[in-house]
Image: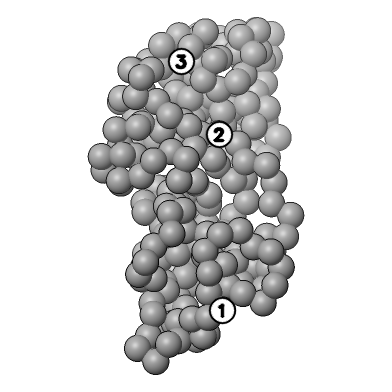
Amino acid sequence: MTAKNNSYAVNERNIRVSNVNSDVVSSDPVVERLREAIRSAGGNKRVSALSGVPLGSLTNYLGGRQMPFGAALKIARACAVSLEWMAGREDTPKQEACVLSAPMQNDDDLTYIDYYNIAASAGFGLCADEVEKPEKVAISKRFLRQDLGLEPNRALMLETRGDSMEPALRAGDRLVVDTRQQHILDGVHVLVVNGGLLVKRVSAEPDGKVRIASDNPLYPPFFTDISRVRWGKPDGDNTITVIGRVAYRLQAMS
């Protein structure tokens, strides 16, 4: 996306902080928002520690150097702001939902959960045979435990794509997933089916079948024997593996 005055942009590689990297003007909107975000999050050293971005690199970005997209994303998460807002867009909210929300000012309230940089498909599936090593994303322990009833070691986050779960879920939504095994299989779950990573609404039927359905009526449901469904990690056999139940959705802005 490109801003109206073309002085900054977000793409797959970098965020352009200034047209002239070594000569930043004080009115550069990205620099000003970067400074505001870092100041609100506790300063350079704290944001560097939270994000994993070296302090020297952070100082360079504040001085006008280009930020790699990955670094910008880490900084935005550590500062609890949306990447679009930090990139200078005027039509996006500053706050990044409830991840790293106001309680982050108290270090004791922070915890970290696994964030998989892959998308769980809300369509026909995305190959999950080679899952990348997860990153860590900070989140309020109070929100995780009191609001969702989850412990950090039994929760993970990933992103969804596709339209089969609309209107409940949209492409780009990030999902907080409860990986604890449930006695009753009901609700929206993340599944691995034939090597594909899916987000579907699951329910147990009285006849011993499991219904796996989309909210979008354009996608038909399918049924399977409950004996094929299990919890845990996929092992490549003919089972349907339940990764966890979707406990919360962080909705992407349009």
Q: Can you say whether 109 is above or below 13 in the image?
A: above
> In the figure, residue 141 lies in which quadrant?
top left
**Quadrant location of the N terminus?**
top right
Q: Is residue 93 left or right of residue 125?
A: left
Crowd tier of the residue under label 2, counting other residues whose Cα lies within 10 Å: few below 14, some 14–19, many 20 or above: some
Label 2 sits on residue: 136
Label 1 sits on residue: 228
Residue 95: horizontal and vertical position, in percent? 36, 32
Determine contact: label 3, label 2, CB under 8 Å.
Answer: no
Q: Is residue 73 left or right of residue 217?
A: right
Q: Residue at x 49, y 81 (%)?
A: 226
Residue 11: horizontal and vertical position, in percent? 65, 38
Q: Which mark is residue 48?
A: none
Q: Tell me the amino acid under the disc marked 3.
A: Ile
For the residues marked 1 and 2, what is the alpha-carbon distance in whole angstroms?
Answer: 32 Å
SS for dot 3:
helix
Of pointers 3 and 2, the one earlier in the residue sequence: 3
Does residue 103 appear in this view?
yes
Of pointers 3 and 1, the one earlier in the residue sequence: 3
SS for dot 1:
helix
Does residue 63 appear in this view?
no
Q: Tell me the amino acid under the disc marked 2.
A: Lys
Residue 111: horizontal and vertical position, in percent? 43, 29
Of pointers 1 and 2, the one earlier in the residue sequence: 2
Q: Can you say whether 23 is above or below 18 in the image?
A: above
Q: Residue at x 69, y 8 (%)?
A: 22
Determine contact: label 3, label 1, CB under 8 Å.
Answer: no
